[in-house]
Image (cartoon, rainbow, N blue to C red):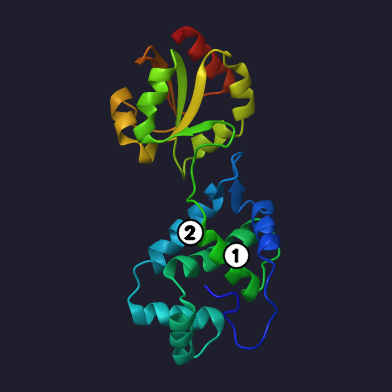
Amino acid sequence: MAADPTPGPSETPDTEALLDRLIEVGAVREDDDGTLRISAALHDIVDLYEQSYGDLPEQEFTEAVADAFGLEYSEAVRRIDEQGVTREEFVAYLSLRAHFEDEDEPVPGPVERATMASIVAEIAPATPVPPEMDELEDDDAEAFLAEHDRAVVFVWRLRCDPCESMKAEIAATLEALPDDAAVAGIDGEAAPTFRRRFEVDTAPAVVCVADGEAAAVETGYRSPEAVAALVDDAF
């Protein structure tokens, strides 16, 4: 999406400053390795807008863009064509307004928000795995478990209230785990092989693995003390 979706001249927004603002308000998260991701909070809003705008017929999509930016239909057609406005960017543009409002923060103007939408559309998708732990992909979980005699894998998913409750206490949970147990997290919705192997059908879940075999599996919210007790019993 072009930096300026509205008629008339304007200054080019400071992309770095806008990215910093997105991180500040919790719309984007930066992992320890520098990876930028859509936050879980913004992801939930984007998901709702995608249901409304993701599959709109072309004419209705153009009408929605015209309405959002106060343009005539013909002008919206021209700008979509010339500036390459994608549905992903438009959904991000609308979602950002809702996110700023949810956070009780001033909503950026159209120019700044359009630039923010372009940033959001280009970065990595949201992940439910908290930044405090390494994230496994479904196809590298097997190697991780083979590498470690004892491992604790937390299974998360987006749009999951008990997951958020556990993540709010994740520092205390990790502090309570033994130093010789490898710890990682995995997005359950993107890891069907892992879930089938350990018979995990819901999130959150705590999977304790010893020598490649399940030693204990618990699902649902678990306090830091409960997780520590589970791991102690398993190992």
Q: Please rate how many residues cluster around mark 1, counting C-alpha atoms within 10 Å: few if below 14, some from 14 to 19, many from 20.
A: many
Q: Which mark is residue 205?
A: none
Q: Is residue 115 left or right of residue 49?
A: right
Residue in the image at 55% along x and 81% along y: 69
Q: Looking at the picture, does residue 13 appear above or below residue 40? A: below
Q: Position of residue 153 (x, y in %)?
A: 45, 25
Q: Amino acid at mark 2?
A: Val
Q: Earlier in the sequence, mark 2 or mark 1?
A: 2
Q: Please rate how many residues cluster around mark 2, counting C-alpha atoms within 10 Å: few if below 14, some from 14 to 19, many from 20.
A: many
Q: Position of residue 21 (x, y in %)?
A: 69, 58
Q: Looking at the picture, does residue 37 appear above or below residue 151? A: below
Along the line of sight, the residue nearer the viewer: 1 or 161 = 1
Q: Looking at the picture, does residue 203 appear above or below residue 88? A: above
Residue in the image at 49% along x and 40% along y: 128
Q: Is residue 21 visible?
A: yes
Residue in the image at 61% along x and 17% along y: 176
Q: According to the image, label 1 marks what residue?
A: 116
Where disc 1 sits, the SS reads helix
Q: According to the image, label 2 marks what residue?
A: 46
Q: Position of residue 64 (x, y in %)?
A: 45, 78
Residue in the image at 43% along x and 69% along y: 87
Q: Amino acid at mark 1?
A: Met
Q: Looking at the picture, does residue 208 appear above or below residue 59? A: above
Marks 2/1: CA distance? 14 Å
Q: Are marks 2 and 1 in contact (CB under 8 Å)?
A: no
Q: Is residue 38 visible?
A: no
